[in-house]
Amino acid sequence: MDLRQLRYFVAIVEQGSFSRAAQVLNVAQPALSAHVRNMEADLGMRLLFRSAQGVVPTEAGATMLRNARLIIDQVATAEAEIRGHAAEPQGEVRIGIPGTISQKLAVPLILAVRTRYPGIKLRIAEAMSGFVLDWLRAGHVDLAILYMPAVDRGLASERLFVEELCLLGPARPKTGLRTPGGPSVDFSAVAELPLILPGQAHGLRQMLERLAVARNVTLNSELDVDSYAAIKDLVARGLGFSILPLHAVASEVTAERLRCWSIVDPVIQREVHLVRPSDRPVPRAVSVVESLCREVLLSLVAEGAWDGAGNVAPEKVSTTSAE
């Protein structure tokens, strides 16, 4: 028994005649008779009573008619819901973003989703890249922006762009703190400055430590602080220098609370990746938010709204570390 047979059966009962049902369905009458015979043979019960006045359902046929209508209606409802999702994505989409990216991406992405897909509820969770990756692995978020390509089986990474790291210090010279003279500083000279950096467990610190070892220098880290806001405040107060993404300090530089220098020999950059699960079906709402997230990020870079971001750079030092 299949859906077509159920539809044929309902039409025969509603029309009260095989011939009228054949006309309505545009199906040959012998084919309808054959379908009903097959149904009756499968069930071992007569479903229709034929008389000179037409066709009426038997007791078993009435039961079949009631359930057939329910089944046909449920299938129609399912089809309508599926087509509705295709036309207008709906549902909740969760995305994990590092803090230094969230301050640039969160508001434009929320506004873009509300404008283009009003049926989607976007939830943004902010944390260090390592934590965001754990959330994605555990299924707590649907998408992630990371400073690393995810190498896990079941995750797919797409590199979107790279962003430059810079040296930052107080906007004005502070007593006892000697600031670099030119607009750029060699990394070996940066390593000798009194630095305020994230702790050893953080990917940014690990990346800098690896680079220091490769350059045969030692980072002069005087304070370990696991808060970017606190790092910038301490630097502004003249307690030392730090190394952060250029875009993360742009507003403080404009407000003349901080000053930044380019780091050279080498230029230090890290990659920004869009990561999603690849081992399970992706709901349409997640798929369209993924595309929109990519679009918004690349637009920010193309429009120059993401300071220090680009596709390539000389002597690039790329990293697979967390934030």
Image: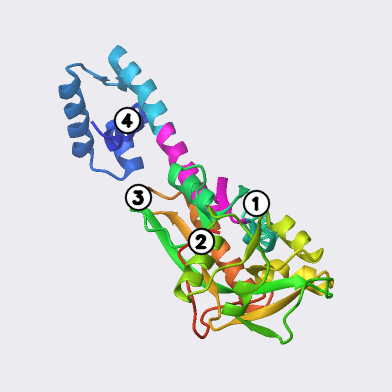
- Percent across and percent down for residue 166 are 64, 74
Q: Which mark is residue 12?
A: 4
Mark 4 Cα shell of 10 Å, populated few (<14), some (14-19), many (≥20): many
Q: Earlier in the sequence, mark 2 or mark 4?
A: 4
Write down the residue under mark 1.
Answer: 118
Mark-to-mark CA distance, 1 and 2: 41 Å
Q: Secondary structure at mark 2?
A: helix
Q: Secondary structure at mark 1?
A: loop
Q: Earlier in the sequence, mark 4 or mark 1?
A: 4
Q: Secondary structure at mark 4?
A: helix
Mark 3 Cα shell of 10 Å, populated few (<14), some (14-19), many (≥20): few
- Percent across and percent down for residue 288 are 52, 57
Mark 2 Cα shell of 10 Å, populated few (<14), some (14-19), many (≥20): some
Quarter the N terminus occupies: top left
- Image point (55%, 76%), residue name: 268
Q: Which mark is residue 279?
A: 3
Looking at the picture, does residue 43 appear above or below residue 304?
above
Mark-to-mark CA distance, 1 and 3: 28 Å
What amino acid is labelled 4 in the image? Ile
What amino acid is labelled 3 in the image? Asp
Q: Earlier in the sequence, mark 1 or mark 2?
A: 1
